[in-house]
Amino acid sequence: MRSLPGKILNTQIGDRIIARDEAGFLLEPDDWDEDIALFIAGEENIDMQDEHWAIVRFIRQYLEEHFVAADARFAFQFVAEQNGLSKRQARQHFFKLFPYGYVKQACKIAGLRQPRAWSTG
């Protein structure tokens, strides 16, 4: 369920104040940087390793190139290509990295806004 758009939480991350919705998603994706990603990953109990960063960078690059968030299936395809996995194996591997899913963890860590509705693949 999407959080209330009028409820804004300000979070201090380093020397910056970052506006987030009540679920912890950034309100402005352009505010994102790796320090913010690490902060949110910590809240999600994700220890960012190279594979996590590769997925987060894929999500950010897709957003920059297409001006919309990638659908989960594109992220799973990216994981498959990077690791030589089948689609099914890639999806399973993705959920080992981000156990609570594409939107709840990967997109949030990548600094995307919370979507109104989403298919997690």
Image (cartoon, rainbow, N blue to C red):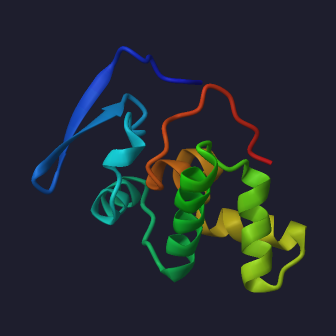
Residue 24, given in percent of the width and then of the height, sits at 39, 38
Compared to residue 99, the image places residue 8 above or below, namely above
The residue lying furthest to the front in this view is 65
The residue lying furthest to the left in this view is 15
In front: 42, or 112? 112
Residue 9, given in percent of the width and then of the height, sits at 26, 29
Q: How many marks?
A: 0
- Horizontal placement of 97 versus 28: left or right? right
Residue 29, given in percent of the width and then of the height, sits at 41, 44
The residue lying furthest to the bottom in this view is 84
Quarter placement of the N terminus: top right
In front: 17, or 2? 17
Q: Quadrant of residue 103?
A: top right
Identified at 53% across, 52% down, the residue is 105
Identified at 52% across, 67% down, the residue is 57
Identified at 82% across, 85% down, the residue is 84
Identified at 30% across, 24% down, the residue is 8
Residue 12, given in percent of the width and then of the height, sits at 16, 45
Compared to residue 77, the image places residue 12 above or below, namely above
- Horizontal placement of 94 versus 84: left or right? left
